[in-house]
Image: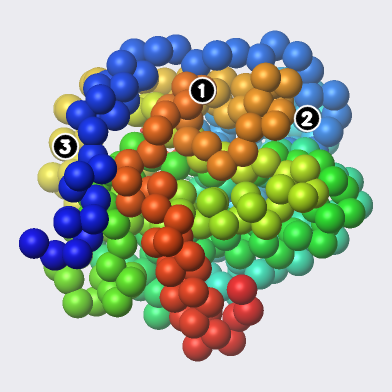
Amino acid sequence: MNAAVRKYWPQYKWSNVFAMIKNMRRPPRRHTGSFGGELVVITGTTSGIGYHTARKYAAMGAHLVMINRNPEKSEAVRQEIAAEFGTPVECFIADLALLEDIQRVGQYLLSLAEPIRVLIHNAGVHLESRQETADGLEVNFVLHYLGPLLITRMLTPKYQRDRTGRVIFVSSEAYRFAVWGLDLDDLQWQRRRYSGLKAYGAGKLAQIQSIHVLADELAPYGITLNAMHPGVVRTESGRDNGPLYQWYKRTIIDKYSGTPDISAEALYYLGASPEVTDTSDRFFHLTTEEELTPPARDLEAAEALWERTRELLQEKGVAL
Ligand SMILES: NC(=O)c1ccc[n+]([C@@H]2O[C@H](COP(=O)([O-])OP(=O)(O)OC[C@H]3O[C@@H](n4cnc5c(N)ncnc54)[C@H](OP(=O)(O)O)[C@@H]3O)[C@@H](O)[C@H]2O)c1
């Protein structure tokens, strides 16, 4: 038995899994108050959960900044939302799997005079086969973990100044696939056989672990950070996977999936409701708080990941 199994096995509880199953049937709590012209930043709004969430915030009167990689799709959504809701909507174009673009996003957000009341890290992918970015990093690792971490951390001086802000990480219950934690010697899936679900789960687990460290760092400025599972909902997720996956998604996954409206409702509640103003470093299934699995609440592992990430970024010439 390896060390991770010995460490985590005794901490696992079946009640944790049953709670998740129960939460799958619970509708999200709703917040009906306006967003009052304040600023929300959302990544990945060209489809699915991000798109519905952008519409929800705009409908509630938010000033919207959308970070997207596809200029045409982004502009079409911008025009649609601005025309329908009459709120200010801006796009910033960036590929959030690239270190240079991630840093450009951080610089841009840092330069905004207006406080960012809510920042939603939503952009994500589910990839059947391993893909590497131009920086030589595995896509799940960058998009779900490194990007949100770097952008949030780069905003520290702004948060110190503004003293307000909620950061929400669109996570997934799939983080549970990383049952025995992360392999710090193979974060890029070069030595192990790549599995789409496991790499996705590992990216989301790394994200959750990073929130523990970031939440501590940003707490003195009144900034809250939370992760949430947005439900199992019909979106464009997995669109670049092969025909077998597409068939499986159409006939099985989509059939049992909800609509992304529930994700948008939950993301609005978590961003705007006074009931969660002081709540930080928690995981929500839609809007119901859940206990994390043992590796996800392991603070030692979170610190070790942070150190490994710092080294890795140093090799790429990026400071953490
Ligand atoms: N759907 C579900 O049931 C479910 C369940 C749990 C968690 N989630 C999470 O929910 C989030 C949203 O996913 P979704 O289901 O709504 O999928 P989706 O419809 O495929 O939307 C993904 C969004 O992310 C953007 N994106 C992908 N790669 C990007 C990159 N490199 N740079 C910038 N933007 C990028 C996409 O932009 P393009 O249009 O340019 O591709 C799109 O706007 C993800 O984090 C996902 O892991 C979804």
Residue in view at x 64 percent, y 52 percent: 216
Looking at this view, is 296 or 90 the one in front?
296
Q: Nearer the viewer, residue 123 or 226?
A: 226
The residue that disc 2 covers is: 62
Q: CA distance from mark 3 to mark 2?
A: 38 Å
Q: Relative to 80, say whether 72 is above or below.
A: below
Task: Identify the residue under disc 3.
Answer: 247
Q: Say few, some or many: other residues with alpha carbon within 10 Å of mark 2 (under 14 / 14 to 19 / 20 or more).
A: many
Numbered disc 2: secondary structure: loop
| Ligand 1 picture quarter | top left
Identify residue type, mark 2: Ala
Q: Which residue is drawn at the image coordinates 31% and 16% (left, top)?
A: 22
Q: Nearer the viewer, mark 3 or mark 2?
A: 2
Is residue 72 among the parts visible in the rendering?
A: no
Give amino acid for label 1.
Thr
Crowdedness near tag 1: few (<14), some (14–19) or many (≥20) residues, C-alpha within 10 Å: many
Give percent across and percent down for residue 137. Answer: 40, 74
Residue nearer the viewer, 23 or 212: 212
> Which comes sooner in the sequence, label 1 or label 2?
2
Q: Residues within 10 Å of mark 3 (few under 14, many from 20)?
A: few
In the drawing, what numbered circle is on residue 273?
none
Occupied quadrant, residue 252: top left
Residue 237 is situated, as x and y percent measured from the top left of the image, at 36, 42
Tell me if 32 is positioned left or right of 316 in this view. right
Instruction: Return the residue at label 1.
Output: 287
Alpha-carbon distance for marks 1 and 2? 20 Å
Would residue 29 be found to the left or right of residue 13 on screen? right
Mark 2 CB in 8 Å range of ligand 1? Answer: no
Residue at x 48% of width, y 65% of height? 303
- Location of residue 281 in the rendering, given as x and y in whole percent from the top left corner: 56, 42
